[in-house]
Image (cartoon, rainbow, N blue to C red):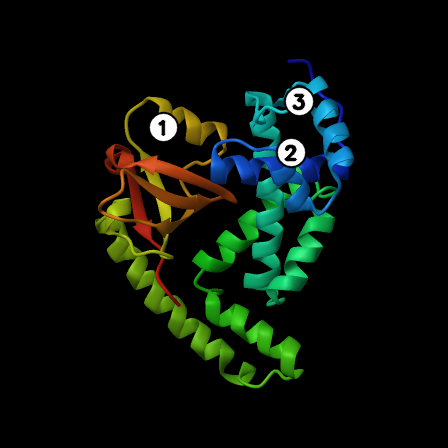
């Protein structure tokens, strides 16, 4: 497909809504989109026709709506931008969920890929670097909420102690890697390497998920054939058969 002109923010909102509905129900209907976006049916019909003309959705009146391969790539990118921004606002800046959601919706349409990737790398750095971690982020939250820097007097010595402890943990990690099924829900791990070849390797490479990326285990059940992970702002489902192909090192908690 030839390179598309950038979509308007309104059309990106439609793509995002369709993506979420399709993820939940396998296909979307016009009324589902109207309800989710709180718009009238005429507006939805016009948007669907335009997106279909651009080759982003499969659409016919009174039929279900699905994303084309090109549309899924575009929609996933919009969703990724939104979630990276929202996570940054809530987890790093300490903004409440509603405020974060509202501002992520506004900013996701204008932010460049360079800035998005830099935000991802910053969050990974804070989570992984011995000088940072959750305690550092919590200190920032306290500074914003209480306008106080109490505790900073001991920060240097505490930081040195933390660094020594985490360096010790890193050395232990290097001696032993783990797989996804050994992690707890919500636990972070650093990707060490991907073994072998095949669809999994190609998929991760296409999303720029390489050794060093921070992976969060979202949900895992021994009764399911898939496990959910979050990495670089993407939500992915991996088959259990692929677990052994990814060597991971747990990120030490702070």
Q: Circle 3 — which element?
A: loop
* Residue 30, numbered label: 2
Q: Which mark is residue 61?
A: 3
Relative to 148, residue 136 above or below: above
Label 2 Cα crowd, 10 Å radius (few <14 / some 14-19 / many 20+): many
Q: Relative to the observer, which residue lies in front, 235 or 208?
A: 235
Q: State left or right for residue 203 relative to residue 78.
A: left
Of residue 69 and residue 66, the one placed in the foreground of this image is: 66
The label nearer to you, 2 versus 1, is 2
Residue 197 to residue 154: above or below: above
Helix, strand or loop under label 2: helix
Q: Residues within 10 Å of mark 1 (few under 14, many from 20)?
A: some
Mark 1 vs mark 3: which is more N-terminal? Answer: 3
Q: Residue furthest front?
A: 62
Q: Residues within 10 Å of mark 3 (few under 14, many from 20)?
A: few
Q: Position of residue 102 (x, y in %)?
A: 69, 56
Determine the residue positioned at 67% across, 52% down.
104
* Residue 200, numbered label: 1
CA gap between label 2 and label 1 equals 34 Å
Q: Is residue 103 above or below residue 32?
A: below
Tag count: 3
- Name the residue located 38 percent from the left edge and 44 percent from the top edge: 228
């Amino acid at each position: 497909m030839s390179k598309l002109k950038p979509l308007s923010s309104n059309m990106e909102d439609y793509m995002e809504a369709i993506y979420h509905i399709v993820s939940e129900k396998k296909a979307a209907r016009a009324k589902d989109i109207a309800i989710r976006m709180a718009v009238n049916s005429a507006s939805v019909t016009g948007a669907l026709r335009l997106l279909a003309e651009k080759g982003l959705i499969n659409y016919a009146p009174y039929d279900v709506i699905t994303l084309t391969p090109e549309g899924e790539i575009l929609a996933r990118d919009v969703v990724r931008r939104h979630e990276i921004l929202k996570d940054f606002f809530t987890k790093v800046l300490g903004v409440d969920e509603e405020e974060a959601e509202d501002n992520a919706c506004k900013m996701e349409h204008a932010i460049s890929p360079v800035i998005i990737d830099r935000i991802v790398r910053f969050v990974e750095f804070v989570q992984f670097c011995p000088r940072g971690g959750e305690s550092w982020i919590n200190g920032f939250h306290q500074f914003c909420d209480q306008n106080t820097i109490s505790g900073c007097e001991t920060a240097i010595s505490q930081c040195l102690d933390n660094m020594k402890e985490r360096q010790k943990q890193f050395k232990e990690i290097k001696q032993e890697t783990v797989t996804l099924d050994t992690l707890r829900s919500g636990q972070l791990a650093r990707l060490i390497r991907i073994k072998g070849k095949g669809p999994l390797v190609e998929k991760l490479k296409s999303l720029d998920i390489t050794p060093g990326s921070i992976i969060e285990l979202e949900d895992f059940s021994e009764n399911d054939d898939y496990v959910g992970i979050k990495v670089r702002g993407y939500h992915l489902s991996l088959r259990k058969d692929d677990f052994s192909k990814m060597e991971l090192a747990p990120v030490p908690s702070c």
